Image: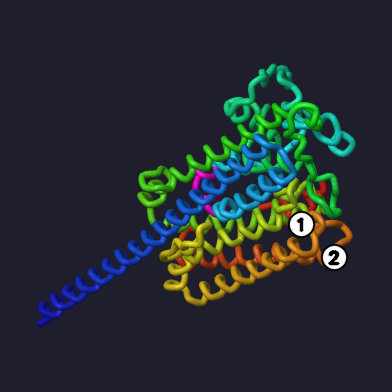
Amino acid sequence: MRRAMLTAGAFAGGLMAVALSGQAAAAAADKAAVLTTYADIAEAGYADSLTTAKTLQQAVEALIAQPSEAAMKAARQAWIAARVPYMQTEVFRFGNTIVDDWEGKVNAWPLDEGLIDYVDTASYGTESDENPGYAADLIANPKLTIGGETIDATVITPALLQDKLQELAGIEANVATGYHAVEFLLWGQDLNGTGPGAGNRPWSDYATGAACSHGNCERRAAYLSTATRLLVDDLAWMAGQWSAGGAARAALLEGDPDAGVATILTGIGSLSYGELAGERMKLGLMLHDPEEEHDCFSDNTFNSHYYDIVGMLNVYSGTYRRVDGSTVSGPGVGDLVKATAPAVDQELAAKLQATLAAASAMKRRGETVEAYDQMIGPDNAEGNAVVQKVIDGLTVQTATLEKAVGALGLQPIAFEGSDSLDNPEAVFQ
């Protein structure tokens, strides 16, 4: 009888082991489905970024071919539209090394714009102890000597911008490519401080002959055309990394599922806390400095921040609305959290929605009342409060993200930090 009981116990134990094995397999399958959705959203987001960048390229070429106020306005609108899908992809940056290593080509900021073109020297100055390329003005100077190196810029080529000028002398503020270089060439400097008004570059900066303003219009057009072409090429490369057989998709789907889930949460948490709440928002608010706003030439910053937050919700929920109105959807990381810890999911989903609501209020204010650089001005308590509410939402949702990491049994994640949040005194030293 005792032997029979042991045999029955062993049999029951075997059934339990099979059941547990089945549960583990189901959990792994669920994680695989979540990672596939995440990769599908990345692929669609970068494809949309590429599509809108190509539309921008067409508008830029139309401006160069027949410069006019209307053509300049159309190019600017195309740039703003191109930011909508791209900003939703920033959530893929942290955790995915391939994206983070590449991101500086397309979205590096802030930039010392005097490297590229003419500036208002009264406000910008003529030199910097920290950056020998600070006022190099490549458009006006076919040959440059910077830090003892002579650069032949007679012909403005992709290699010149990407290999020679981008981060020239190892200085990150030497930004020669990407959205913000194009933005500067379309808007010019915003000389309004925290007052109303964005950059106001005249369309005649691309005119020919006697109508050319500020000189060097052909070189300026060549730079704008080349920088826009590079943006398209760089986005095409990243879209390919997330397509079938792409390196980014393979690294995610062929790796450890838990590591993949951690990558998703790292992206949400690091963008939410250190990057957006800290470096892009709190720092500028503390300093009341319009130079610390993300889209500083166009005054499009409120939109960029809003769509960063939309991107976080996309990957948490597993749903992305494409620019053509179609939807990419599937199991999101939120489904994993809900299955494991429903209360944590409920709390986190509510906080994500609260942050989105705060960002929506900031966006409405930007569209109807004042630009972001005015909101962060020193004597604007109401505008400051609107921005601070978004920062607060991003900060508290990050704390709940840490709960989600623990609930899923993952190793603790060190989200990106920021002195403006973690050590404010250091900002003023």
| Position of the N terminus by quadrant | bottom left
Answer whether residue 233 is visible to the viewer in this image. Answer: yes
Residue type at tag 1: Tyr
Answer whether residue 415 is visible to the viewer in this image. Answer: no
The segment highlighted magenta reads 90-100
Pointer 1: what residue?
A: 372
Q: Residue at x 44, y 69 (%)?
A: 335
Q: Which class describes the residues within 10 Å of circle 2: few (<14), some (14-19), or many (20+)?
A: few
Q: Is residue 31 above or below residue 188?
A: below
Residue 381: give its label. 2
Q: Is residue 266 left or right of residue 81?
A: left
Q: Residue at x 52, y 45 (%)?
A: 99
Magenta stretch holds residue 355:
no
Residue 426: give its label. none
Residue closer to the observer: 406 or 363 = 363
Where residue 206 sits in the image (x, y, percent)? 73, 34
Question: Does label 1 or label 2 sit earlier along the sequence?
Answer: 1
Q: Residue at x 83, y 29 (%)?
A: 127
* Quarter location, residue 177: top right
Residue closer to the observer: 249 or 298 = 298
* Quarter location, residue 117: top right
Q: Which class describes the residues within 10 Å of circle 1: few (<14), some (14-19), or many (20+)?
A: many
Tell me the element at label 1. helix
Q: How many marks?
A: 2
Residue type at tag 2: Ala
